[in-house]
Amino acid sequence: MPVQLGLVGKPNTGKSTFFSAATLTDVKRAPYPFTTIDPNVGVGYVKIRCVCRELGVKDDPRNSICIDGWRFIPIELIDVAGLVPDAWKGRGLGNRFLDHLRRAAVLIHVIDASGGTDAEGRPVKPGSYDPLNDVAFLEREIDMWMYQLIKKDWGKISKVMDLKKDYEELFSRFSGLEVKREKVLEAIEELGLHLKRVTEWSDEDLLTLVKRVRAAAKPIVIAANKADVDPAEENIKRLKKELGSRYIIVPTSAEAELALRKAAHAGLIRYIPGEGDFEVVGNLTRKQREALEYIRERVLQRYGSTGVQEVLNRAVFDALGMIAVYPVENEAKYTDHEGRVLPDVYLLPKGSTARDLAYMIHTELGEKFAFAIDAVTKRRLGADEALKHRMVVKIVLAR
């Protein structure tokens, strides 16, 4: 199953435009709340430098795409409806929308960095609303949504846990939110809650636990969108100064990325997502040329890219700490059993071993795993040795 990222934020921040730009999927976009009711689910890609050129081979990708030496690895994006204050209470169908985020490993919070959208998602004059308010708002909505799910029948389940002298009931509640028990146990010990009976935990203790678990298990990356609109640049500097120690913050123009990808798809320009420029290769109208020059001057030259690809990359590789690994069957030719060169690349958590990779490919491979070989250095890898980013690995099975 691909890594899943959730797109969240209040209405009219450009969240659905970000989704469209990242996936080239058409979704309804309009300047009013609740354009998106059911979640949009689509395939986006993270981008790494492919090993094909370093190895001097022409690759034949199967589960991913290689463009000019860049490997694009699929991930899943879940775009939920815009959230409004007190969404966790069900306001604006908020509970329903939040429930769509259970599977997401990282939340991408799309904010209007120009300050042109008020707390309810209504358009206002750029600069008249402080986008910093949106960060605290979303944290509270996610935390309170998780808190009410965990706290349900708390009096009963806390007694059960004290009786059994374990946290299994709590682990089960968090597992429904796709949170692993290790994250919960770490938070319990860090907060000193393991020194108390569970029935002695206060409401504040439980809420603090939920906040700690959410921050660790569902990190948030901020896409500071509409970065080309004044006064976004100053707001982004302020966001980074005040929140940069807690969040990954990326200046973003989803509209610019969508325009570039559509122009590239139409054969008008040559553009690789995440790059800092494009090349005109087709005949443009005056209006098209002006629009592209605006993007070049106000977005690419100012920020280095549109930010959309960087948001996805940083969510997966920085916030989640994933690595990309290429499995092969022939370590001399870097091929699979059908002769395809570097056909697949898998995303794994940092610290994963060759045995973990084997199990990810197929359960039987994991069960029969003997050792692995670094296909580039030809060095033998033990079952417990951690893999490195962009490593090419051959798995050897026990006879």
Image (tube, rainbow, N blue to C red):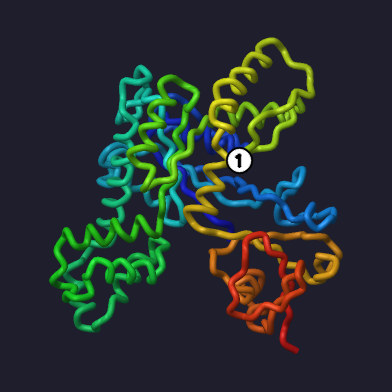
Residue 202 position, x and y percent, is 14, 64
Q: Residue at x 68, y 64 (%)?
A: 391
Residue 240 position, x and y percent, is 39, 38
Split into 4 quadrants, where in the image is the N terminus?
bottom right
Residue 365 position, x and y percent, is 68, 78
Q: Residues within 10 Å of mark 1 (few under 14, many from 20)?
A: many
**What secondary structure is found at the residue carrying circle 1?**
helix
Vertical relation: 148 (above or below) 28 = below
Split into 4 quadrants, where in the image is the C terminus?
bottom right
Q: Is residue 382 left or right of residue 171?
A: right
Q: Residue furthest top?
A: 286
Q: Residue at x 43, y 24 (%)?
A: 31
Q: Nearer the viewer, residue 373 or 329?
A: 373
Q: Is residue 117 left or right of residue 267?
A: left
Location of mark 1 (residue) = 23
Q: Nearer the viewer, residue 275 or 369?
A: 275
Q: Residue at x 79, y 24 (%)?
A: 281
Residue 259 position, x and y percent, is 62, 26
Q: Amino acid at mark 1?
A: Thr
Q: Residue at x 54, y 36 (%)?
A: 307
Quadrant of residue 232 within the rendered picture = top left
Quadrant of residue 114 within the rendered picture = top left
Q: Residue furthest bottom?
A: 399
Quadrant of residue 386 within the rendered picture = bottom right
Vertical relation: 149 (above or below) 274 = below
Q: Is residue 378 left or right of residue 72?
A: right
